[in-house]
Amino acid sequence: MSHPDAEATSDALVAMRGITIQFPGVKALDDVDLHLRAGEVHALMGENGAGKSTLIKALTGEYAVDAGTITVAGEPRVFHGTADAQGAGVSTVYQEVNLCSNLSVGENVMLGHELRRGGRIDWRTTHRAATQHLENLGVAIDTRTALGTHSIAVQQLVAISRAMVTDAKVLVLDEPTSSLDRGEVEQLFAVMRDLRARGVAILFVSHFLDQVFEIADRCTVLRNGRLVGEHAVASLTPGSLVQLMLGRELDTLEALSSVADRHVDRSGTPVLRATGTGRKGVIEPTDVDVYPGEVVGIAGLLGSGRTELARLLAGADHADSGQIEVKGKAARLANPRSAIDHGIAYSSEDRRAEGILGDLTVAENIVLGIQARRGWRKLRKSEQDAVVAEYIAALGVRPASPNALIRNLSGGNQQKVLLARWLATAPALLILDEPTRGIDVGAKADIQRKVAELSERGLSVVFISSELEEVLRLSQRIVVMRDRRKIGELASHDVDVDAVIDFIAHEGQEGAA
Amino acid sequence: MSAVVKHRLFWPLVVLLALILLNTVSRPSFVSITVHDGRLYGSLIDVLRNSAPLMLVALGMTLVIATRGIDLSVGAIMAVSGAVALTIIQDSGDAANPAVLAVAIGTAVGAGLVCGLWNGFLVAVLGIQPIIATLVLMLAGRGIALLITGGFITTINSDPYKFMAQGYVLGLPFAFYVSLAAIAVVALVERRTALGMLTEAVGINPEASRLAGVRARGIIWGAYAASGLLAGFAGILYSSNIMAADANAAGLYIELDAILAVVLGGTSLAGGTFSIAGTVVGVFTIQTLKSTITFLGVPPAVTPVFMAAVVVVVVLVQSRRFRRWVGLLAASLRARSPRRPDRAEVAS
């Protein structure tokens, strides 16, 4: 385990010292230091809620700091907005690409820096410059095509080249790889290595530990808004890094491995039985049944129809074919509300757009599910407090303050609050779409453990995740999807990840032929 | 202290008190209240009395804005409501009969409710943008009111009807009690039941609310219905004040005052969390501003300019970003001034 050497602080391109940021009800950062050197990839590590995003926003000028100093290239800086930070050479590429998808690639790269001639924009030279900037990153695409027509990976690279137009000395990459596939990650890493060689300081945030070990030189670890330490990545192992992030050993996941082998009684009536449920142009008619206490995983690539199927089962979208039976009785799931009345709860994959209500408190977000069913009759204050306290404790929501606004919480804790919302309605079937995406190992383990525990007590769960390991670990049965249809079912104790991947590739092709 | 400053009602209240103070300094009689025949008189009492129609409309507007909507038709609904009430009373030929008045008021308020339901139908069921949906009735409503009155300004003579806007109970204007009742009912319905929270949820994120099981359509529809109903009551008060149904003048531009009152009260036009207390303060601010104009003797020709200037100042004072700029400016001025003696010391 190494410690920050004196050299690191003296030749740092960016030095943040004693950064403290306070939100109403939450101390997001408390006396945190960060040192970025020119020509390094520096990983910022920590659980959700550790303060990574807040620290980044302090560096990019989005948040004002309550205490502490920021020095860029030896010069003390106070940022009053992102423009100030960009002026100081700090550019950022966010997790959700902040570009205009209806403009062309070239316009996006050069936005605000268009080349002019005689007071008018000279589009030809502007596009030529954009092409040059993209080529510097090894990207060869027609800059006149609309950005929206390209993959997220290309958009990500466009965002980076846009950052490099302003000649950035410091590049902040917030979760750049979360929606990329393996090949695209390689492409991004090649660009990052190239920029590093050119002396750019890169601050890299990722939940994928293997990627951190692959690309990063040093890392700064945060926990609960405080600095844990700065380390050379080579001096760490994945185990020791996780331990630093969590402050405890991570042995809980191993204990879960028995869940998949648990015997589920499938002789009775299924909680949910869908027969030929489909929607024209969205998903082909599909059969699914889920028995009491069973966790059914849905595996498949992004866009395979996983989410679309879940939305039909949850009444979020209308099925135009097939029948659905809930506990043996035919049910019409016309809207989410009727599904909820049948005991079906659905947690969307898009936490921010379809889950949380940012301006409401944690407590209000939790009771919303119950309250929506009760209508006008308000939950008594004492009942509400009891429910909220119970679930905050049971799921380990941090900070454990019911009156904090949910938008001030980290992604993992927001996810826990959403889980609490649904559990509080006492559902018979819980449909979880990507409940662990973009959240850290600690919160992920908490949520997995909760799912396993609840299913053992008789709750039925439909579990969707891009991470096959997770699907295999938690579910007893796996529905495999490809090209918007179900291609088969697997018992998870018979297979491993490779077998599932093989099945997706092989069976899918056979079906298509 | 900082908790007081951070309270969402702090700046709205500061603005209201500053306005009252301004009036008092320019003419101390502004705050004086006299008693005649057991009734209170004075500029502040006038504010309480004259603000009643705006109060009712602004309360409804608050609920609509909380759902991310807007209701431009409230002024026209007031005209419809006044026209219905006065036409019924005039046609009955017995303007003092309580039964006639009850039917007239009930029908007029019912007409307001129907207008509100129509707006809600367009927005919540057909999915038309609120500003367009309510524009329909804003333009058509006055035409409907003219049809009802047969194109004339209907006038009546009815002491009980007149009482609503001009009468006194226990020394205070009856209209003020109507305001109080409306505030109490809206506050109780929204805050003692879960309706307020569900309304805020729908305003913050309609799709997330729908997936959480909230009947978003019903809540949005209900907000427009409530707005129409309250505008119906406001129309009665307005017509009672002038004892006439003037389809062209009743509630003219009141939608703009109501929106302004809601915003001054700290409720965002983007929808979501709303403050009924804030709207109440906003309404009193606007009404005080109107009295100020009369009180200071601002010539009618420049009244809109004066009003606009004050509104700009008020909005700036409530803007967090503007206050921060002022703070930064003040800090940089403070930081600059002490350096001079330092340099002098170095030189000497």
Image (tube, coloured by chain):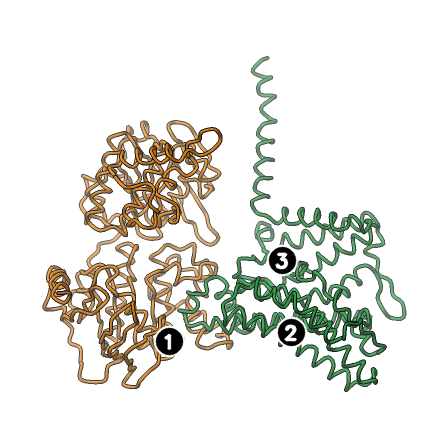
What's the mark number on residue A340? Answer: 1
Q: CA distance from mark 3 to mark 2?
A: 22 Å
Residue at x 33% of width, y 35% of height: A35
Circles 3, 1 touching at the beta carbon (< 8 Å): no
Residue designated by label 2: B229
Within-10-Å neighbours for mark 2: few <14, some 14–19, many 20+: many
Q: Is residue A250 above or below residue B84?
A: above
Could you tell me the amino acid type at mark 1? Ile
Asked if badges 3 and 1 are on one and the same chain, I answer: no
The one of B19 and A89 positioned closer to us in this rendering: A89
**What is the x, y in percent for residue A359?**
48, 59
The one of B193 and B294 positioned closer to us in this rendering: B294
**What is the x, y in percent for residue A417?**
37, 63
Say what secondary structure mark 2 lies in: helix
Relative placement, left or right, of A52 versus A378 is left
Residue designated by label 3: B265
Determine which quarter of the picture holds residue A86. top left
Q: Is residue A255 above or below residue A320?
A: above
The tint chain B carries is green
Q: Where does the C terminus of chain B fall, quadrant-wise?
A: top right
Chain on which label 3 sits = B
Determine which quarter of the picture holds residue A345. bottom left
Say how many tags the image has.
3
Determine which quarter of the picture holds residue A362. bottom left
